Image (cartoon, helix red, strand yellow):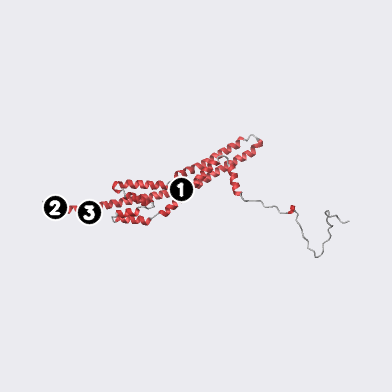
């Protein structure tokens, strides 16, 4: 007897020599779907943030402030690069050299260059206090350039301290459950992970803030040097022109007085 096939189906016979055999896969033999990888990075960040403990919230706040300040300073210094006008500065010094202070004041007026703004302020207050006007204008420009540097300095110091605080709290959490054998392994590993994650985040924020902080500090120092150099040149040139004008006035007054005098 031949073996019986499925119910209601005729017994399977041998295939004909030229017949085409069609195979049908059952649902269980279908390929398994590939695991989804979308959102892996976001889940990784969120998981590590949660494992870092409560100290991760102030670290997150510090990172947001640091990123905001760095972006703001980058745009400010980038705009200042386009505001520079060294050719007009040379024209102003040339006008002062030939004694045309009015033209020098006109050239430096309504300029976005910090050096020209300082020079305009000095030229318009030279009869009252040239040095005082230059110092006040230079101080205003340096204060604008050094904006938020104190914040960045604080963040560079604060971020690793917060990471160290997270290390301490994570170790405290680890050693708290050492006496409980059932929870010791899970809790100790979780506390060590909290300590390492907090420390890594704090150091990362400090490194991220330190490089632009040093760069912006050097730019402020360069601007201060430029302002001091321009102010010194302006004072020397105006003083020299004033001395020449005084000598011309004295030279023109002496002959007339000698001519009118009688012995």
The numbered disc on residue 248 is 3
For the residues labelled 3 and 2, say whether their Cβ atoms are less than 8 Å apart.
no
Task: Tell whether 255 sits left or right of 216.
Answer: left
Q: Earlier in the sequence, mark 1 or mark 3?
A: 1
> Residue at position x 62%, y 39% from top?
188
Which of the marked residues, 2 or 1, is nearer the chain's N terminus? 1
Residue placed at 40% from the left, 50% from the top?
223
Looking at the image, which residue sits at the far front?
8
Looking at the image, tell me whether mark 3 or mark 2 is earlier in sequence order: 3
Q: Which mark is residue 214?
A: 1
Say left or right for 132 vs 18: left
Secondary structure found at label 2? helix
Crowding at dot 2, Cα within 10 Å, few <14 / some 14-19 / many 20+, comes out as few
Q: How far is the residue under mark 1 from the one under mark 3?
A: 51 Å
Q: Which residue is mark 2?
A: 260
Instruction: Residue at the far top: name it.
Output: 179
Which residue: 41% across, 54% down? 83
């Amino acid at each position: 007897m031949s073996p019986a096939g499925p119910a209601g189906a005729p017994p399977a016979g041998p295939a004909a020599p030229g017949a085409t055999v069609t195979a049908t896969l059952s649902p269980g033999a279908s390929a398994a779907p590939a695991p989804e990888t979308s959102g892996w990075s976001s889940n990784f960040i969120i998981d590590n943030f949660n494992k870092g403990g409560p100290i991760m919230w102030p670290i997150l706040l510090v990172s947001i402030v640091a990123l905001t300040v760095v972006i703001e300073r980058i745009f400010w210094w980038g705009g200042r690069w386009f505001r520079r006008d060294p050719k007009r500065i040379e024209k102003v010094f040339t006008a002062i050299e030939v004694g045309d202070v009015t033209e020098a004041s006109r050239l430096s007026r309504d300029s976005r260059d910090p050096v020209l703004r300082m020079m305009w302020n000095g030229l318009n207050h030279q009869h009252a206090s040239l040095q005082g006007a230059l110092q006040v204008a230079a101080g205003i420009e340096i204060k604008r350039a050094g904006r938020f540097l104190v914040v960045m300095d604080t963040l560079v110091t604060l971020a690793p301290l917060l990471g160290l605080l997270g290390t301490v709290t994570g170790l405290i959490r680890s050693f708290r459950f050492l006496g409980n054998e059932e929870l010791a392994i899970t809790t100790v590993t979780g506390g060590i992970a909290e300590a390492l994650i907090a420390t890594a985040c704090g150091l990362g924020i400090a490194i991220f803030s330190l490089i632009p902080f040093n760069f912006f500090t050097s730019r402020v120092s360069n601007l201060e040097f430029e302002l001091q150099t321009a102010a010194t040149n302006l004072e020397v040139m105006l003083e020299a022109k004033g001395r020449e004008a005084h000598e011309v006035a004295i030279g023109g007054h002496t002959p007339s007085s000698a001519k009118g005098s009688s012995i």
